[in-house]
Image (cartoon, rainbow, N blue to C red):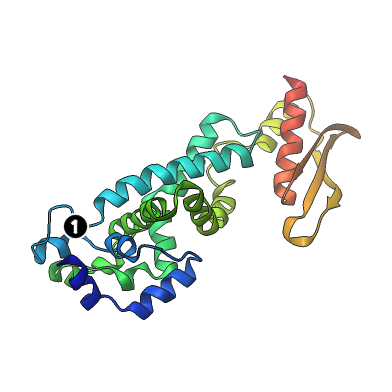
Amino acid sequence: MLKTLWNNAMNSTQLQEFQKRINYGFKNQNLLMLAFTHSSYSNEHRLGRLEYNERLEFLGDAALEFIISKYIYKRFPNMPEGELSKLRASVVCEGSLAKKAKEIGFGKLLLLGKGEELTGGRERASILADAFEAVIGAVCLDSGIDEAEKYVLNLMGGVIEELKDSFRDADYKTKLQEILQKESKEPLVYSIVGENGPDHVKEFTAQVSHCGKTLGTGKGRSKKEAEQNAANNALKKFD
């Protein structure tokens, strides 16, 4: 019954366009359709008690945390555990997932009950975030965790880069400045001393100095990241 309802309710062209947008084609289309089925739709049509996306959401939530944790652990080797936890939380939070789901067009494909439809369910952050996680779970079952990792990082890699500096209570540059201010009023000087690689994978080398003395150097994919790593390198020497 559920498959018949899906076929009647879902536009196959929209499903195909969606898969092109996310750069992943499902071998089992039923998994994708289940990921978009909200409990209100299942209840309204008196389907089985598990014929909606919450189990897929459960799986997708666990996979998402693992994938993001693994990525940021490797991506930021100098970031302490507390900051890694904050960054992960900011990436996998409801608001971040719902925003990405809206950008991709999840709302248009959701199967909702009439009541949920009338009260703006297609734009509700909690429903969009849940569907986002459910699709991750569907990819896991369809192709395994490695494909799910590719899918997640393709969509969320940019989000991680945007958020990585905004959550910190005090970054390395600030910490280094606080230490030196106790002994000197002379400012720290940061300079970019090297650039390597093509534009899309460029690596910068930064140097931090004080009163003409080099305190530390660091590399990064952006000038800001290189400066942060240079400050962290200097902090280790102070320690």
Rendering coords of residue 104 (x, y %): 44, 68
Quadrant placement of the N terminus: bottom left
Relative to the observer, which residue lies in front, 47 or 165?
Answer: 47
Name the amino acid, label 1. Glu
Asked which quadrant contains residue 124, the reply is bottom left
Asked which quadrant contains residue 218, the reply is top right
Counting other residues with Cα less than 10 Å from the Cα at mark 1, is it few (<14), some (14-19), or many (20 or more)? Answer: some
At a point 72% along the width and 19% down the height, the residue shown is: 239
Residue identifier under label 1? 51
Rendering coords of residue 27 (x, y %): 40, 63
Relative to the observer, which residue lies in front, 28 or 40?
Answer: 28
Rendering coords of residue 169 (x, y %): 54, 37
Asked which quadrant contains residue 229, the reply is top right
At a point 65% along the width and 35% down the height, the residue shown is: 77
Left or right, 201 with reference to 207? left
Q: From the viewer's perspective, is residue 183 above or below residue 206? A: above
Of all residues, the one furthest to the top in this rendering is 239
Rendering coords of residue 130 (x, y %): 31, 55
Of all residues, the one furthest to the front in this rendering is 27
Give the secondary structure at mark 1.
loop
Left or right, 204 with reference to 72? right
Left or right, 167 with reference to 112? right
Task: Report the number of discs.
Answer: 1
Q: From the viewer's perspective, is residue 93 above or below residue 151? A: above
